[in-house]
Structure formats: structure tokens, C-alpha cells
Image (tube, rainbow, N blue to C red):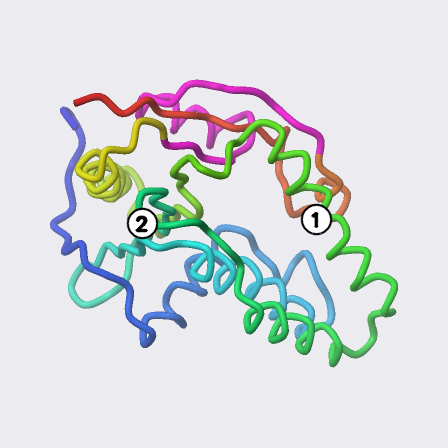
Amino acid sequence: MCGVAVLPIEIRDYRKTDYAACAALVDEAWGFDTLFAPPAFADAMRFLYTEGAIDISNTLRLAVHQGRVVGLLFGYNASLGPRHMGLLFLLRLYWRLLWVEGERPTGKWALLRAGRQHERHKAQLLDARHSEVVLFVVAAQQRGQGIGQQLWADFLAVCRHSGESLIAVETNVGEASSYYAQLGFELSGTFPSPLHRIGLMRGQPCIYTYRVRE
């Protein structure tokens, strides 16, 4: 991290009491309130991205500076067991969508169908048995201060220690993918996604992979 002004942080495990802070970071990155109306719909999407990532991840790490969460990396370490999305999470999501007023049911379910199509296209490039960076966010005001590199180094060390050989990440061709390239990831391929039509994906979706070395 030569030339980077590194912010002193503590990296620790996620706790349930951190949920609101993590959801705020995710919202800052995606801007759900500008994409969805009414507010209950935006809240459901915020829940999908934040709680959904928590549900399918088994390595949840936070960067904390002066008591405030300034970054997060939720990842899946394949050596810890198969991934799955819990039934309870899906029921809670469906319940939130069911009670969103002002949005036709067809629109809500079309969104869920688009998400399933996205995952099917993604699966053609990504082996579910590989480890994955599921959600990776750094607070806007703290970017460029080495937080992302420290979170990534922490997750990489965990995967390396457990013998993982490959780590994947879903991102978009552009600024985000350039960041992963700087970390040592390589482009595996791109795939189509209907989520573009509703603004949840910015740029061409793609998979980048990192080969873990001893």
C-alpha cells in the first residue's frame, strides 16, 4: 500500500447490532431510495442486498474506526461448507414485498424473476464450490485510505489458511472491476442481466477471479 495514507482501523467480526450501520453503507453505495418508490420498496431492496449477503456468507468482517463501521467484506469461504439462502430470509423478503403499497404485484414478482435469471447467468461462469467476495463496501468519505486493501488481505488470509485456491467476485466492467484488477483479480467473463433495466446493475456484469498462492 505504498503511497496510501492508511487509516488506523480495527477489523472484527460482524455482530447483529451492526446491521443498521452495514445497511447504511450499502444504501450509500447503491442509493435504493433513488431507484425505488415507495420507501417501503426501497427498504425491501436494501434488506435484499444487506441481509441477503449476510445470509449466504460465512465470513463477515468489518472495518471499524473510532467506533464507527467504515467498511465491510462479507465473503463465502467454500471450505466451511456449502452455501445456501435460508428459507427464513426468503419468507421475510416475500413478506416485505407483499406489504409494499403503490407497487403492482406483477412488478414485485418481476423483480424477483429478474434476480433469479441474473443468478442463472452468473452460475454459468462461477462454480458454486469456489469462495467468493459477496459484498464489499467502504464508506465514501474513507475511500483511498487503505481500508479496502486491509479488508481484502484479511479475507484472503482466511481463504489461504483453509486451503482455498480460487476466490471469485461479481462486479461490473468499469471502475469497480479496475479496483479488483489492482488487487490481483483477473476477468473470467461477462454475462447478461435483466437487472440492468431497473438500475440495480451499473455497467456490464462480470466475474473476476483471484488465484490464491501460498
**Kind of residue indicated by mark 1:** Arg
| Magenta range | 167-192
The x and y percentages for residue 182 are: 33, 22
Q: Is the residue 133 above or below the residue 106 in the image?
A: above
In terms of image quadrants, where is residue 212? top left
The residue that appears at 73% across and 43% down in the rendered structure is 117
Label 1 belongs to which residue? 116
Quadrant where the N terminus sits is: top left
Q: Secondary structure at mark 1?
A: helix
Q: Is residue 104 left or right of residue 20?
A: right
Q: Secondary structure at mark 2?
A: helix
Q: Is the residue 103 above or below the residue 187 in the image?
A: below
Closer to the chain start, of discs 2 and 1, is: 2
The residue that appears at 37% across and 68% down in the rendered structure is 21
The x and y percentages for residue 24 are: 44, 64
**Foreground pick, 158 / 19:** 158
The x and y percentages for residue 85 are: 53, 59
